[in-house]
Each structure stands twice: as structure tokens, then as C-alpha cells.
Image (cartoon, helix red, strand yellow):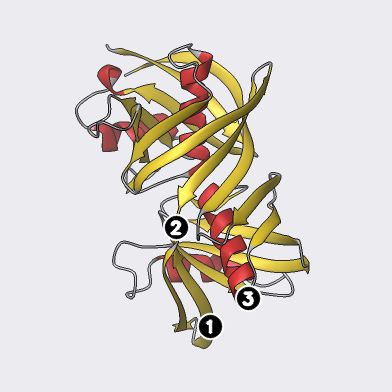
Amino acid sequence: MKQISFCKFQGFGNDYLVLENADLPVDVEEFAKRICDRHFGVGADGISVLEPPSISKANYKCRIFNPDGSQATFSGNGTRAAVAYLYFKNYWQQPTLLLETLSGIKSFQILKQEGKTFWFKTILGKPSQMQKLNLDILGQPLKVNFIDVGNPVCVIFSERFDIPWKKIGEQIEYHPMFPSRTNVVFVKPVNENEIEIRIWERGVGETSSSGTCSIAAAVSYLNNNNRRGEIAVKAVGGTTIASWDDDDLMCITGKVDLVFCGVFFD
């Protein structure tokens, strides 16, 4: 029986298990299903696997796996948890870390640490594939904003959340237009500097927070209003500060908390 060490972190209720690749079984996808199970495993919204980088300019590499075993191209909270793990373990002590992901290298700047809480500013790069789509969902036409922020996200604006948004989110995730599936975020504007969101995450379902969905919502909102700047994005789990500047660079500022560390017997 193999003993696999891990640390569990949560960012606004979005929880990830951080592990080192050298400790894992060969079939990481099946392992992710077992350890993420909330009844028979540890329970998490995904696992963050750290390993040496394959790109010389990066300091570490991180792969993200969802509870259904699928691999995500990126996760704001998942990578933030991975970087916090490196600081917690004293593997890294510099103020900035470059992390290799499937969607490119991301820059993490540690802002402060208070006990087991770590605050980071993450530079995510530039958005792509920004377009407006018309989908047929549940027999009704639906207008969505599609954007790739390292992960594909469909953004839907609504004045209220008392709609079957989970059912709509699931339908969009598996829509034929998205062969690799997509994240879905529902956005309710509060004022010119604040929005509220509900999240349906690809491979996970309903989540309390998501860094990529937060930045996708913010960029779509700013773009629709012909603006650049900073937006407070309020999710069920907490508020993330998201920005999109004149150079097209996206940033998110948020925290992640260490919950506990342990050993999983596989």
C-alpha cells in the first residue's frame, strides 16, 4: 500500500489537494477520482500536481486534474494553492514565482502571509477568442459571451439568479459547440465596479469560487462597457479582485488558506 503525502488548500471555498508528482501512481486520472471523492477519499474540487518545469524560464510546473479525472488547462485557485504549498514547504522564498501550466507560464507575486493564509497577485496573460455566440439551450435561444482566459468560459449576464442556472450551465458545458467542454459563469452587475457571479465549472459542477471564471466575468463585463480597469468579483465563497489593463493583461488578486496536510493510503 502506497502512502501519498498531500496538503489541502482552499481559496474562497474552492478546495484543492496539492501533491508532488514523484509521489503519485502512474494513472493520475484514476487517482484524482479516488482522492477527490468526498465520501471515500479526502474530498476536493481537484488536485494540483507539482513537478520540475519543462520550460527553462519557469521555476515549477503544475498540472490540474478535476474530480472526474479530466485534466484542466488552468485553474486560478488550483495554481494559487500549488504556489502557496511551495512557500509553506519553504521550497521557494523569492517574492515572484513563474509557474508552467498547460495554458502557458503564469507569474505569481506573494503579497503577504498571515499564518496559514497566503495572498497572491497572479498575472494571467491576455484573453483570446472573445466572441458572442447564440446557443439553443433547453429549447430557448441564449446569448453568451465566449472567452478563453487560459480556460474556456461562457459568460452569461443576468439581472437575477433565481433561474435554473445549474441546469443551464450543465447543458452549455456539454454543448456540441465545445468538444472539450467549457466553464460557465453567470454574471449579475451590482455597480460599475462590482459584479456578482455563480459558477458551473467544467468537470466539477457548481463551485463556490473560480479564479478563471472570475477573470472571464470581469473581462467580459469591462469589454461590454468599453472599459479597462479593476473589478470586484463577488462569488459565493468570497470576493476576488480582477483587472484588465490597457496592454490586455489580466490579473487576479486573492487568497488561499492551508486547511491541513495528511497522508492518503492508495
In the image as oriented, which residue stretches furthest toward the left?
26
Residue 216 percent coordinates (x, y): 54, 60
> Closer to the camera: disc 2 or disc 1?
2
Q: Residues within 10 Å of mark 3 (few under 14, many from 20)?
A: few
* Residue 108 seen in this snapshot: yes
Q: Which residue is mark 1?
A: 143
Does 251 appear above or below 246?
A: above
Tell me what residue is drawn at x 37 percent, y 39 percent: 64
| Structural distance between the alpha carbons of marks 2 and 1 | 23 Å
Q: Residues within 10 Å of mark 1 (few under 14, many from 20)?
A: some
Horizontal relation, residue 143 to residue 5: left or right: right
* Residue 44 seen in this snapshot: no
Residue 226 badge: 3
Q: Please, what is the three-letter code of the amino acid marked with disc 2? A: Lys
Image quarter in which the N terminus is found: top left
Tell me what residue is drawn at x 38 percent, y 23 percent: 19
How many discs mark residues in the rendered view? 3
Q: Quadrant of residue 244?
A: bottom right
Ranked by sequence position, the earlier of labels 3 and 1 is 1
Q: Which residue is mark 2?
A: 126
Q: Nearer the viewer, residue 219 or 183?
A: 219
Q: Provide the secondary structure element on which disc 1 rests.
A: strand
Horizontal relation, residue 44 to residue 103: left or right: right
Residue 207 badge: none
Residue 237 percent coordinates (x, y): 68, 44
Tell me what residue is drawn at x 68 percent, y 16 percent: 115
Ranked by sequence position, the earlier of labels 2 and 3 is 2
| Structural distance between the alpha carbons of marks 2 and 3 | 16 Å
Ranked by sequence position, the earlier of labels 2 and 1 is 2
Q: Please, what is the three-letter code of the amino acid marked with disc 3? A: Asn
